[in-house]
Amino acid sequence: QYSASSNLNRFVLNEADYAYDAAKYARRTLHAGFTVVRNLGDAFNVTIALRKAIAAGDVPGPMILTAGSSLASTGGHGDGTNGWAAHFDADPGPKQGVVNSVDDAKKAVRQRYKEGADWIKITATGGVLSVAKSGQNPQFTDEELRSIMDTAADYGLRVAAHAHGAEGMKRAVEAGVASIEHGSYMSKEVMKLMKDRGTVYVPTILAGNWVAEKAKIDGFFPELVRPKAASIGPLIEATFAAAYAAGVPIVFGTDTGVSPHGDNAQEFALMVRAGMPAMEAIQSATGVAADFLDIAETHGRLQAGKRADIIAVVGNPLEDISLLENVSFVMKGGTIYR
């Protein structure tokens, strides 16, 4: 979970620290009413271990579909050594998810498969929170993207793309990614391309608003990050409104871990404020999401034969969508957790 000390934490926390935090946040997420999540990027592959522990009943939490560590280019969003002093001489490669060639791309995807990932996550453009100057520039060549997509297909894995800038977004969509995350500078051309190809947009408005607010606090972000957070973050809500109006397929998502775990449901009110009817917003996190994740046979709708994942709130969320931020009952797989 991001904080003012996140960049320091990479040097002072170990795998066990991240694992204990992950278990704590999984419980918090489940109690907030989310019984299935897709996780796109972690540290030390803790979500792969957490997925197994939750499935075994050892730890309370949502069912997890995870990408493990994401794929980036050197200096790109997802290169964990960004901002390090030169004397560290860090040069991560495909095993760590850093790709600089077609062969690197193949190896990185195969490594994720070996480690147990359910998805492949790529950072198709720069990002907001990475200690690097640009949040928009494309980060993979067309050839590298094709290599990622072809190798992922060989292993039955789908690809999700973090993307803010339009050019990197366009390359990723044309390469065949399943979803675009964030989409801050999404152009009308990209919207049409996504609609025509059925590429899903996962807006993460909550994350954009959160970083924009934190950018107002002196010292919260590194100075290289602060202007990106202030300028890119506020764009997502308007992009979502335009994409929804253009008919782009939309699935609920929050980029939680940027905003605090447990606050996930705040995304609903932001989607409704931007023009999506309350029922559609709810469906984007239930049935529509299950269709997208290829789990609709067992999840996503209250139907005989499907898993009993049920939440309840006091009141009618179709009249006040913010009621979903205060869940009073959570059942997952027929077991009551709250």
Image (tube, rainbow, N blue to C red):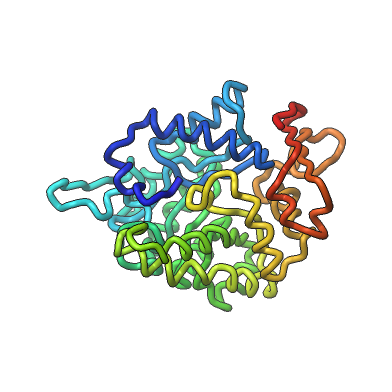
Asked whether 250 or 338 is in front, the reply is 338
Q: In this view, does 152 lie to the left or right of 289?
A: left
Q: Residue pushed farthest left?
A: 87
Residue 193 on image: x %, y %: 59, 71
Q: Which residue is drawn at 77% across and 28% down?
A: 334
The image shows residue 139 at horizontal and vertical percentages of 37, 62
Locate residue 254: give its quadrant. bottom right
Q: Is 107 drawn above or below residue 159 in the view shown?
A: above
How many numbered discs? 0
Q: Which of 86 and 162 is in front in this view?
A: 86
Q: 290 or 174, which lies in front?
A: 290
As drawn, the residue found furthest toward the front would be 218
Residue 238 picture location, percent across and down: 59, 73
Quadrant location of the C terminus in the rendered image:
top right
Residue at 27 percent across and 40 percent down: it is 11
Residues 174 and 127: in front is 127
Q: Where is residue 325 in the image (x, y as percent from the top left)?
A: 68, 50
